[in-house]
Amino acid sequence: MASEEWSGRGMTKVRDRVQVDVDSVDVGSAATADALAAVSTSEYEVQAIVEHHGRSSTCGHYTALGRDGSAWRDLNDHRVKMLSPRDARPAASEGFLFVLLQPCMAHIVRVVGRALLALVFIWTAIGSWTAWDNAHEYTYSRLTDAGVMPLIQSAAGQLGTTSDSIVGLMLGAAVFLKGMGGLALAFGGEACGTVMLMLFLVPVTFFMHAPTHTGPGSLERNFDETSHLLKNGAIAGALLVLWQSIPAKDARSGGELAPRDSKKRR
């Protein structure tokens, strides 16, 4: 794709798009404002686009879109985004500062949301660790209701140990997965944290809270178990959404972020 420098001010014209590299220009200078105004003609419309670039300090970059709101692709092929005509023109009330801060706010919201999700697992891991006996007794009773204790007792007999020891081992694995998975998620290891937490959440939900495994009980108990089941399902859904939104790594770009389904140009 051919490109050319536009006005020599860090702008690059690519067919019907003009990109302004914020690392190369002073976006607040009068010269840059004049250059932006020069390309804001009937053919182009200057528009702020918010995208992150891995660990780069760049908060965003500016792109002139065709007035039809067509798709744009940034020059290093790490980001692809489709815009509708309405999305291509932000309301005037949003202002330049709002659009400039939008990528930073998106990053902050993602970090806060990730931390709140991780806190659920970290807190329960601490609770299970500090009240180990109660957690062990609860786990034992749930596995008994689920009908898997005969299998555990049979395995314990063949291994020369006790069913209590195996239940303790299972509880320890659960505490490890949700504790370390929560920490990984909170500190940016989204892929690793999500996998660990799903490995914890799926079997625990099935054996501990599935209606067919909890045995008969009062209406209040059944309501509580159903609430736990739905809560765990909602958390699993949030983890799946987070997993789907994790950008893939492009090895050829030195680890820059790239969409999972982006096609590489030869």
Image: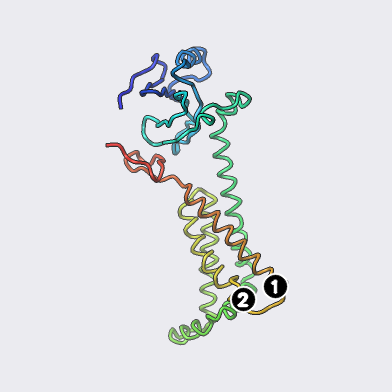
Identified at 54% across, 61% down, the residue is 178
Q: What is the x, y in percent for residue 173?
A: 51, 68
| Callout 2 touching callout 1 (CB < 8 Å) | yes
Tag shown at residue 82: none
Instruction: Please tell me which of labels 2 and 1 falls first in the chain.
Output: 2
Q: Name the residue carrying label 2.
A: 214
Indicate left or right for 20 with 117 as reference.
Answer: left
Identified at 55% across, 60% down, the residue is 179
Identified at 39% across, 23% down, the residue is 16
Q: Residues within 10 Å of mark 2 (few under 14, many from 20)?
A: many
Q: CA distance from mark 2 to mark 1?
A: 9 Å
Instruction: Kindly identify the amino acid type of the residue bearing the numbered disc 2.
Output: Thr
Q: Name above or below for residue 236 compared with residue 31.
A: below
Q: Name above or below for residue 258 compared with residue 147.
A: above
Q: What is the x, y in percent for residue 41?
A: 47, 15
Q: How is the image coloured?
A: rainbow
Instruction: Kindly identify the amino acid type of the residue bearing the numbered disc 1.
Output: Arg
Q: Could you say whether the residue bearing mark 1 is in a helix, strand or loop?
A: helix
Identify the image quadrant of residue 8: top left
Q: Nearer the viewer, residue 50 or 156?
A: 50
Q: Residues within 10 Å of mark 1 (few under 14, many from 20)?
A: few
Q: Name above or below for residue 162 compared with residue 186.
A: below
Q: Quadrant of the N terminus?
A: top left
Q: What is the x, y in percent for residue 152?
A: 50, 81
Q: Name the residue carrying label 1.
A: 221
Q: What is the x, y in percent for residue 7?
A: 40, 14
Q: Quadrant of the C terminus?
A: top left
Indicate left or right for 260 with 220 as reference.
Answer: left
Q: Could you say whether the residue bearing mark 2 is in a helix, strand or loop?
A: loop
Q: Name above or below for residue 216 compared with residue 30.
A: below
Count of numbered marks: 2
